[in-house]
Image: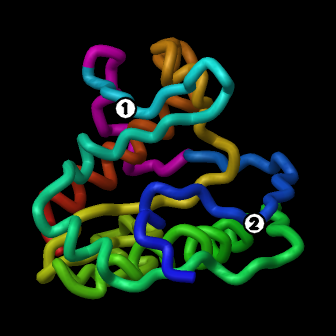
Amino acid sequence: MNTPDILFEHPNNHVDNTGNRSSTDKSWAAKVPPTTKSQLRIHTRFIPDGRVLADWSALFPERSDDILRRSQPSFQPNPRAAWKLDTEADMETYFCQEIVAPVLSKYTQYPPVTLQCKVDRGGVIVDYHFVWKDRIVLIGEIKRNLIRVATLLDGTFEKKSDQVKLLKELRGYAIEVTIQGP
């Protein structure tokens, strides 16, 4: 069945997350300035019943082409018993099938967006680039259980070295993409 608002839906397949954690110790990220609480803007929030309300408007606000995009056919990924997320490769497969495939189905036109993986940019390798007209519009980096949602939401991340390192790495990727271009 065609799913017009698949961009607002959460994946349906069950996930068995083993809890293994990635680390982030990229040597090049050490010289990136840290992100401060006053610089971090988080639009996702928890609502009282425990659900997460993801607000993408800061990233991609609604535009007139969204009506055209929603008219493009898209379908939920095939059902499966469960995803076992143990390694980064497991997470990459999950991400590509459960997140990227439905999203890119809405970006075949209006505008067409493509995906590039593991692009080396002068020694800095970003896992995913989403590209429109030779411009990188979004980057993605796979990390296992490294984001501490509560510390980001309540602003205490500056006291957690793993979160400081993660944000420096993510900021470094963004700086690298901005400086070097596609």
Above or below, 127 against 47 in this view is below
Label disc, if present, on residue 131 of the rendered structure: none
Mark 1, residues whose alpha carbon is within 10 Å: few (<14), some, or many (≥20)? few
**The C terminus - image quarter:** bottom left
How far is mark 2 from mark 1, CA to CA?
25 Å
Please name the predominant secondary structure of the magenta segment in the image: loop
Q: Are marks 2 and 1 in contact (CB under 8 Å)?
A: no
Q: Please identify the quarter of the rendering in which residue 103 is found.
A: bottom left
Q: Amino acid at mark 2?
A: Asn
> Is residue 101 left or right of 162 when viewed as pictured?
left
In percent of the image, x 87 and y 52: which residue is there?
A: 18
- The residues colored magenta run 25-38
Above or below, 154 against 4 in this view is above
Q: How many marks?
A: 2
Task: Specify whether residue 33 is painted magenta.
Answer: yes
Which residue is at the front of the view, 60 or 89? 60
Residue beneath label 2, please? 13
Spot occupied by residue 11 in the image (x, y as percentages of width and height): 63, 62
**The N terminus - image quarter:** bottom right
Spot occupied by residue 72 in the image (x, y as percentages of width and height): 33, 83
In percent of the image, x 45 and y 49: which residue is there?
A: 27
Q: Please identify the quarter of the rendering in which residue 84 is found.
A: bottom right
Which residue is at the front of the view, 10 or 31? 10
In percent of the image, x 88 and y 73: which residue is there?
A: 81
Task: Say which element carries label 1.
Answer: loop
Q: Amino acid at mark 1?
A: His
Residue beneath label 1, please? 43
Task: Specify whether residue 24 is painted magenta.
Answer: no
In percent of the image, x 20 and y 52: which residue is there?
A: 62
Which residue is at the front of the view, 173 or 69? 69
Check the image and tell me how it is coloured: rainbow
